[in-house]
Structure formats: structure tokens, C-alpha cells
Amino acid sequence: MIQQQDSTIKLLQHKATNYQSIIANNQEVNNEVNLQLDYLKTEVKRHKRDKIFLGTGLGVSIGIIGILAILN
């Protein structure tokens, strides 16, 4: 009876240790995912900014070409 209780206690301790490892691993994965999301958000913002600059540049260029065409 006592051996069975000791065995059960050891098994539960082993399970608790395994669960703690799983929790620690999940936290590491979550941290890594959050870092990747931050990086992707930064990249998306950078691409939006580049598109705005490109669009503005093209608009100004077309406007200048149009004005020059009218003046000629």
C-alpha cells in the first residue's frame, strides 16, 4: 500500500515536472512569435511608407510632365 502511494507520488511529481517544461516551452514559443509579429508589423509599415513616397513621387513627376507639355 505504501509502495503504491510512493509510486503514485513519484508519477505525479514527474507529470508536474513535464507540465512545467511544457509551460516554459510554450512561453518561449509565444515570445518568439511576438518578436516575429513585431518585425512583420514594422515591415508592413515600411512598405506602406515606401508606397506613399512612390505614389507621391509619381504624381509630382506626372504633374511636372503635364505642365511642361502644356507650356510647350
Image (cartoon, rainbow, N blue to C red):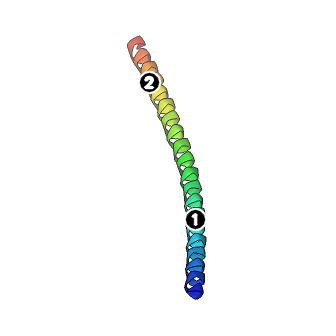
Judging from the image, what secondary structure is the residue with disc 2 in? helix
Give x and y (percent) for residue 21. Answer: 59, 69
Which image quadrant for residue 63? Answer: top left
Total of numbered circles in the picture? 2
Nearer to the camera, 35 or 6: 6
Disc 1: which residue: 25
- In this rendering, the answer to whether 35 lies above or below 60 is below
Disc 2: which residue: 59
Query: Which label belongs to residue 56?
Result: none
Whole-number angstrom distance, CA of label 1 to CA of label 2: 51 Å
Which quadrant is the C terminus positioned in?
A: top left
- Residue drawn at (48%, 26%), measured in percent from left and top? 56
| Amino acid type assigned to the residue bearing label 1 in the image | Asn
Q: Give whichever of discs 1 and 2 has the lower sequence position.
A: 1
| Amino acid type assigned to the residue bearing label 2 in the image | Gly
Question: How dense is the environment of label 1, judged by Cα within 10 Å: few (below 14), some, or many (20 and up)?
Answer: few
- In this rendering, the answer to whether 27 lies above or below 5 is above
Judging from the image, what secondary structure is the residue with disc 1 in? helix
Q: Could you tell whether 28 is left or right of 63 in the image?
A: right
Pair 1/2: label in front: 1
Farthest front residue in view: 1
Nearer to the camera, 58 or 1: 1
Question: How dense is the environment of label 2, judged by Cα within 10 Å: few (below 14), some, or many (20 and up)?
Answer: few
Nearer to the camera, 58 or 16: 16
- In this rendering, the answer to whether 23 lies above or below 8 is above
- Residue drawn at (55%, 61%), measured in percent from left and top? 26
Which quadrant is the N terminus positioned in?
A: bottom right
- Residue drawn at (56%, 48%), measured in percent from left and top? 39
Give x and y (percent) for residue 40. Answer: 52, 47
Nearer to the camera, 32 or 59: 32
Give x and y (percent) for residue 31. Answer: 59, 54
